[in-house]
Amino acid sequence: MEKADLDRTMNLLWRRTLGTPQGSRGPRQRVSVDEVIRAGIAVADAEGLPAFSMRKVADRLGLKLMSIYTYVPGRSELIGLMVDEVVGEVPHPALTGSLRERLTVAAGHLWDEFHRHPWLLQVEASRPWIGPNGSARYEWQLSAVEAVGLTDLEMDQVTTVINDFTAGAARSSILARRAAEESGISDAEWWEATAPVLERVMTPGAYPLSGRVGTAAGQEYNAVGDPARSFRFGLERLLDGVEALLRDRPSAAEGHV
Amino acid sequence: MEKADLDRTMNLLWRRTLGTPQGSRGPRQRVSVDEVIRAGIAVADAEGLPAFSMRKVADRLGLKLMSIYTYVPGRSELIGLMVDEVVGEVPHPALTGSLRERLTVAAGHLWDEFHRHPWLLQVEASRPWIGPNGSARYEWQLSAVEAVGLTDLEMDQVTTVINDFTAGAARSSILARRAAEESGISDAEWWEATAPVLERVMTPGAYPLSGRVGTAAGQEYNAVGDPARSFRFGLERLLDGVEALLRDRPSAAEGHV
DNA sequence: TTAAACTCCGTATGGCGTACGGAAAAACGT
DNA sequence: ACGTTTTTCCGTACGCCATACGGAGTTTAA
């Protein structure tokens, strides 16, 4: 990445705060950066990041491929802009009630966001982009754990745990959804090819616990292996653990150290 | 995906159990499937999944591109084989001691594995491959939570939570590591381009909590934002929550329902 | 001895990101 | 009013990618 591109992208990220630079000399732009970003989001929503391409973004806007590069430095920078855009898409709900309620809302907000834009979990920026909506998100998350008796470090760690767990659970959920929907081969065909091998190979008693507990046989699919249910279960355990940390703490109302 | 490819891949996954088919008529293969898989792992370890290509695997083996397709149906199937291979790479440690100790070992095993092969988190199979090592992994994880007073459903949910959280935390850790190492632009240059914009834009008091808690200023980087530390912190909270679930449960020694 | 099956690989197709440079359009300096 | 400068839009080209197809050569089975 070029340093100039980095600077250009930072200015694009904060374009609302900074205002439009003005005074551009050439022909007017046919579309706007926002439209490019929104088109990018539409493509990624529809096809995922691997199939996301500059050509498809251009097509969607009625532009030719290379014109996109006058709006945005390149593919990865556009993706950075798309991320900050969707982070600001739904206003952050007010955080009220108990710590547990606030963290439940915060985690649910993330969970919904990942499911609305599954490609978020495919983003692999070598540098994190610091944009307005990402910054507001972090501030909002911290406000959920402010003044409950956690140190500053613990405040960061608790939000990190919630984020990491939610991301991991959402990843499982989204992979399962893709398997069910888009696999190019029907469930029946899949079992038709898989079952004979598994029968030869999984001698009785080889996997006793998996057989009893697991979804391997495809039974009880509504309970075992239901990602949303697992997410809720895990979040409850996590919140129990956070509350346990605060119980029996001397200065519970004092807040940060 | 073709059904024939699925069948072929299942037979490759379970090749150790099934034995080599024998009786092949043409010239002998110059290398083995295992070598192809190991070469693939080497490429992915070195460059990550996006840069992983069939050409590079072929080059590494002294073969020409198209010969790889006589060993393996295609790119995504090869990746499936690579995944099951690395899952079997390190023997699963014996699970002894308390539930807490067993789950700590299980989570740590996953954590290490993700860091040894960061591309595991980039794998997006539309169908999960059921291979020998993945199956053994699930059985091993279930054995960590067997007969402690959890229902079958809860056993699955607890292992799922541990997996999801560990995957999410490892993802954060690996992204942070990549940012530090491989970003093509130095930390100094990055700040040089980023700081001026942030100074203009982050008016004093705009992000009070982030400023106090966060790493935004790059201070205290050893504590706040240390992924390994966050992982350990979160795991402790999670395990506290799991133990709380078991406390005050009538038939603690009875096991599953 | 012939036929079948298999490996290895050359070629071609259709995708991708993006570097480069040219034509046209708009605004600025004079 | 008129060049000059800047900017947009885009055609072309390069070097990647996965993989479909078919041919040549090799080994075994019939």
Image (cartoon, coloured by chain):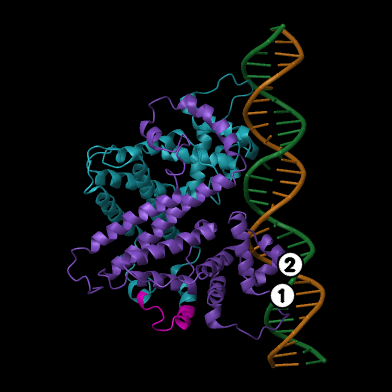
Chain colours: A cyan, B purple, C green, D orange
Comes first in the chain, label 2 or label 1? 1
Is residue B192 found left or right of A145 in the rendered image? right
Let me know if residue B189 is in the magenta part: no
Q: Nearer the viewer, residue A38 or A94?
A: A94
Looking at numbered disc 1 in the image, what kind of residue is underneath it? Arg
Q: Residue at x 54, y 69 (%)?
A: B85
Q: Which residues are magenta?
A: A196-209
Q: Which residue has dot 1 on it?
A: B30
Q: Nearer the viewer, residue B119 or B213?
A: B213
Q: Secondary structure at mark 1?
A: loop
Q: Residue at x 26, y 53 (%)?
A: A240
Q: Nearer the viewer, residue B191 or D12?
A: B191
Residue B63 in picture, x, y percent from top left = 73, 67
Q: Which residue has dot 2 on it?
A: B62
Chain under numbered label 1: B
Q: Is residue A142 above or below residue A226?
A: above
Q: Residue at x 23, y 64 (%)?
A: B246
Is residue D27 found left or right of B210 in the rendered image? right
Residue B38 in picture, x, y percent from top left = 61, 68
Q: Nearer the viewer, residue B142 or A225?
A: B142
Let me know if residue A197 is in the magenta part: yes
- Label 2: how many residues lie within 10 Å, few (<14), some (14-19) or many (20+)? few
The alpha-carbon separation of the residues under discs 2 and 1 comes to 9 Å
Chain under numbered label 2: B
Residue A193 in picture, x, y percent from top left = 49, 75
> CB of mark 2 within 8 Å of CB of mark 1?
yes
Residue A144 in picture, x, y percent from top left = 30, 40
Res B149 label? none
